[in-house]
Amino acid sequence: FALPTTIIILVPFLRAIPHELEEAASIDGASRLGFFWRILLPLSMPGLVTVGVLAFVGSWNGYLLPLLVISTGTLPQDLWPLPLGVTQFSTQYSQDTAAVLAYTSLAMIPALVFFLAAERRIVGGLTGAVKG
């Protein structure tokens, strides 16, 4: 049984959060659920955003699953996902390099916009939670 890559990335991030925070929250009267919602979730937000970005980019650039699901006769080529659309410009004897570059540039734009929107949350996670 193999864990998805996104889970493998998130677990060490959550283990890096110090246990002293939970002890301090319980001393202050927070329940375990209150600790989760008020302390752990905001501290793990950069890791969750990073996992979200990686999952989005991985599914956006997916090639094999759409190739297996979409058979040649069921969906017109105009409605193919972008990674499958790139294959329209490659044949056994030639390749339209300009069209392949345009398609891959177009496929990169939504992932880049999603990352730029989430960049502040990712960089915010680089600061520590405990002083000293």
Image (cartoon, rainbow, N blue to C red):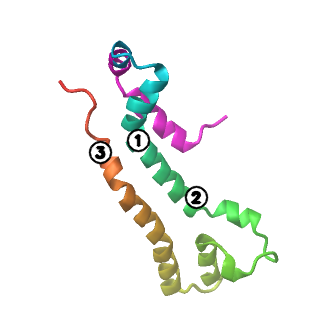
Spot occupied by residue 128 in the image (x, y as percentages of width and height): 26, 33
Q: Which residue corresponds to mark 1?
A: 45
Q: Earlier in the sequence, mark 3 or mark 1?
A: 1
Lateral position of residue 37 relative to residue 124, left or right: right
| x and y, in percent, of residue 67 in the image | 70, 66
Residue picked out by circle 3? 124
Q: Residue at x 75, y 68 (%)?
A: 70
What is the span of residues highlighted in magenta in the rendered image? 1-24
Residue lying farthest front? 29
Farthest left residue?
A: 132
For residue 66, the mark is none
Nearer the N terminus, badge 3 or badge 2? 2
Asked whether the beta carbons under mark 2 and mark 1 sit within 8 Å of each other, the answer is no
Q: At label 2, which amino acid type do we have?
A: Ser
| Kind of residue at disc 3 | Gly
Q: Can you tell which quarter of the image residue 114 is in?
A: bottom left
* Residue 29 placement (x, y as % from top left): 38, 16
Tell me residue 89's x, y (percent): 60, 83
Q: Nearer the viewer, residue 33 or 17?
A: 33
Q: Residue at x 48, y 86 (%)?
A: 98
Q: Looking at this view, is 11 or 33 the one in front?
A: 33
How far apart in space, not on screen, are marks 3 and 2 (Cα)? Answer: 25 Å
The residue type indicated by label 1 comes to Met
